[in-house]
Image (spheres, rainbow, N blue to C red):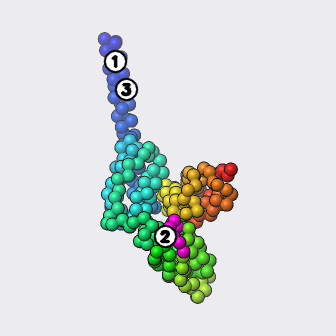
Amino acid sequence: MKKSLFCLSIITVTYLFLINVNLFASETDDRIVSSAKKSYVFKTYLNVDDVKIQSKEGVVALSGTVTEESHKSLARETVLSLHGVKSVDNKLTVKGEVPAEHSDAWLITKVKSTLLFHRSVSATDTEVLAKEGTVTLRGKAVNAAQKDLTTEYAKDVEGVKAVKNEMTVLAAAMKPGEKTTGEKVDATTESVDDASITALVKTTLLYHRSTSAIKTTAKTKEGVVTLAGKAKNAAEKDLATKLVSDVHGVKKVVNNMTVP
């Protein structure tokens, strides 16, 4: 009788344990899906895409369609940076025809995406054209420094051979207390979650020709990005810090990359 009661107790405890484990796993999966949908990347860059998210015990599956190739990696990197995610199966497909690599259409998309990730330039006020690898920039810049930085970022996109910057600098002086486009974005950086920042940082370093080949990792906590890995030299390390510092939501960069 005692043996039977003991076995029953063991079975009951095991059953309750398994229920609690399953409930915890279910809550974690629900939180992962909810956090992804509420993330800055999904609300800002993927808001017109049809992305479906499923999570089972931390293994996330992404399906549906996106408008650009870069959105596939952004979605993956954002979800992969969420707490509790073990792996991501990215089955997203690009809607419509995908531009051939290094084609003019491909370059335009790459340059526009690169400008979107940085707060010191304005992608919305910049028109990007391309012909045989030469990129032409048109639109408005708030000052000469912003115009020059837009040129610098466009030149550093893989495949760009030359840049013609025909942007006009606004002649009117800024009113006292008026904020630039980048400063306006900075005012809302508290809404940029750490997972989105990490995704934007990784994509930024990949898109810039000068940092695309560096072996680095990025982690974000409360807007502070920590870089680790290897850089070829001090200049490459400093450039990584500069580029990451200008990504939306980044408050500070701690660069722990090693130099031979």
At a point 50% along the width and 81% down the height, the residue shown is 138
At a point 32% along the width and 20% down the height, the residue shown is 8
* Image coordinates for residue 69, horizontal then vertical, percent: 40, 62
Name, please, the residue furthest toward the front: 132
Residue that label 3 marks = 13
Residue 221: tell me if it is visible.
no
Where are the magenta residues, as a range? 157-162
Q: Nearer the viewer, residue 212 or 150?
A: 212
Residue that label 1 marks = 7
* Image coordinates for residue 86, horizontal then vertical, percent: 44, 44
At a point 42% along the width and 54% down the height, the residue shown is 76
* Image coordinates for residue 174, horizontal then vertical, percent: 59, 83
Q: Nearer the viewer, residue 197 or 14?
A: 197
- 1 relative to 196, above or below: above
Q: In this image, 258 relative to 66: left or right? A: right
Residue that label 2 marks = 111
* Image coordinates for residue 36, horizontal then vertical, percent: 41, 55
> How many other residues sit within 10 Å of disc 2, few (<14), some (14-19) or many (≥20)?
many
